[in-house]
Structures are given as C-alpha cells and as structure tokens.
Image: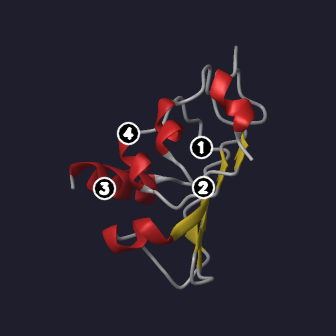
Amino acid sequence: MKRKEEAIEFLNSMENIVLKFKDGLEFVKSHNTVASEKKVIEISDLEKIIYLDLSNNNLLGLPRGLSSLCNLEVVILDNNHFSKPTRVLRGLKSLRVLSMKNNSLSYLPKGLTIMT
C-alpha cells in the first residue's frame, strides 16, 4: 500500500501531467491549471491509468511507487533531466511506448529494444 500512496502523492504534485484512463476519462493539469473534471488522483485510479505524460517537469527520476501503475501502456517523459533510464519502468509489463526525448541519457538498457 505504501508504494501506491507514494505514487498518488507524486502524481498529484506534478505541475504538468496528462493521464488517460481505461474508461476514456482524462486528467490534465498544466501550470497549476486543472483542465479536467477530476481534481485529484486517488488510489482506486492507479490500475485504470494507461497513459502517463510527465513532460516538462524538471524530473531527475521517478519514485518506485509508479511501478503500481500496472496497466500503463504509454509513458512520456520528454524534456526532463533524466541521465539514465529509470528502473521503475522495468516492472510495467503492459508498457508499449516510452518517450524520453530531450533528456541527457547516456545509455539505454539492453531489454528496452525488445518492447513490442
């Protein structure tokens, strides 16, 4: 339960975030403006999230709690400050698309090339 709470706290603290859920709902927050009906993300939402965009947040890494987003298919981490791939993504078995444009990556993990 602690990892899920960590994920919720992290996601709700983001200044720029786009989430898409299995049921078609979206959560969008940009520069402290919430542009969706949903105002906060709750623990019951975690398993429904299939798309996560955390671009432009000046992130250096991701908390382990994000591994509880077990149905994530798309993760966008563009325009942050990642210098190496994050281990959190390893456990995301549904992940099909990962974008990390405009970061300072020095290498890609070996298993990344087998994503289909």
Q: Position of residue 84 (x, y in %)?
A: 60, 21
- The mark nearer the N terminus, 2 or 3, is 3
The reply to whether dot 1 and dot 2 touch (C-beta < 8 Å) is yes
Q: Position of residue 87 (x, y in %)?
A: 49, 30
Residue for badge 4: 64
How far, Cα to Cα, is label 4 from label 1?
17 Å
Residue at coordinates 52% horizontally, 67% vertically from top-left?
49
Q: Which mark is residue 89?
A: none
Circles 3, 1 touching at the beta carbon (< 8 Å): no
Three-letter amino acid code of the residue under disc 2: Asn
Q: Which residue is mark 2?
A: 16
Question: Which quarter of the image is occupied by the N terminus?
Answer: bottom left
Looking at the image, tell me whether mark 2 or mark 4 is earlier in sequence order. Answer: 2
Q: Is residue 54 above or below residue 85?
A: below
| Local SS, label 3 | helix
Separation (CA) of disc 3 from disc 1: 21 Å
In the image, residue 59 above or below residue 65: above
Q: Nearer the viewer, mark 3 or mark 1?
A: 3
Residue 57's tag is 1
Query: Residue 26 appears in which quarter of the rendering?
Result: bottom right
Residue ID for mark 3:
4
Circle 4: residue type: Arg
